[in-house]
Amino acid sequence: MKKDKLFDLKSITEDFNFNEQVAEVFDDMLSRSVPFYPVVIDSIAELVRRKVPLGSRVYDLGCSTGTTLLELSRRLADMELHFIGIDNAPAMIEKARRKVEMYSKSSVIQFVEDDITTSLTADADVIICNYTMQFIRPLARPKFVRQIYDSLPVGGLFFASEKIINHDKKLNRAYIDIYHQFKKRQGYSELEISSKREALENVLVPFSIQENADLIRQAGFSGVETFFQWFNYASFVAVK
């Protein structure tokens, strides 16, 4: 795993982009930047095991380098699930395919380079968006989530993990400070943290827990619950 040093030299002057440079270090970036990501994957696996039948189809929208599906395929190997990852970044899809081949998972996992906002079909039993909706323009999110709802059968599951904001300004500032301390403990410098925040400023637009829950409910889902939260990160599960 190549170490993430993209933001250690100077302040970034362009917006964050999922290019080849990012793809090469993305796995390290994910493990050091997203708190308790393995716990989120474990939780998704436990809910999938209890709520969907054997042989179901699991879609990961914005799958990046395929880590989520690889981990789920290992945890749920006995369920004979079919995994499909979709991402519009060629570098991410290329790396995901290399990893699948390396771990001999090509028979159960496939990756598609496509626009996740237009490529959904009606054969999904589970749809996952881990830290994906936050990169979609806010005005486009209602239509996107409605497409997800329409793609699932009754009883189908939708998982969404997001960076979140708190509308209480003092609490929000405290959450951000706690998160920055977390990143420092993972080895990131103040310069790296500041530079990445600057690069993401116009790209990543977070909602609050309530705003995310309302977005999912308004798409038609009958139930929405938060199954994980760590300060300014949260994960949701919705049932059609």
Image: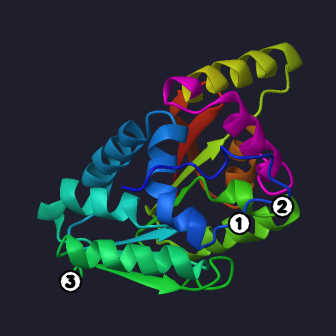
Q: Which residues are magenta?
A: 184-209
Image coordinates of residue 126 in percent, x first then y, are: 42, 65
Secondary structure at numbered mark 1:
loop
Q: CA distance from mark 3 to mark 1?
A: 30 Å
Name the residue rendered at 72%, 34% in the picture: 191
Question: Which of 155 and 76 lies nearest the eye of the viewer?
Answer: 76
Q: Earlier in the sequence, mark 3 or mark 1?
A: 1
Residue type indicated by callout 3 = Ser
Q: Which residue appears at 76% of the width and 36% of the height? A: 194
Can residue 192 be found in the magenta stretch? yes
Instruction: Find disc 1 in the rendering and name its residue.
Output: 17
Q: Which residue was labeled with disc 2?
A: 14
**The residue under label 2 is which amino acid type?**
Glu
Q: CA distance from mark 2 to mark 3?
A: 39 Å
Can you see residue 34? no
Magenta span contains residue 213:
no
Element type at marker 3?
A: loop
Asked if marks 3 and 1 touch (Cβ < 8 Å), the reply is no
- Residue at screen point 63% across, 26% down: 179
- Circle 1: is it few (<14), some (14-19), or many (20+) Cα within 10 Å? few
Are there few (<14), some (14-19), or many (20+) residues within 10 Å of tag 3? few
Q: Assess whether mark 1 and mark 2 are in contact (beta carbons under 8 angstroms).
A: yes
Give 208 or 3, whichever is nearer the viewer. Answer: 3
Say whether disc 2 or disc 3 marks the residue closer to the N-terminus: 2
Q: Residue under circle 3?
A: 107
- Give x and y (percent) for residue 109: 30, 77
Q: Quadrant of residue 206?
A: top right
Q: Secondary structure at mark 2?
A: loop
Residue 47 appears in the figure: yes
The number of numbered discs placed on residues in the rendered structure image is 3
Picture coordinates of residue 51, whole percent (x, y): 32, 54
Q: Residue furthest left?
A: 78
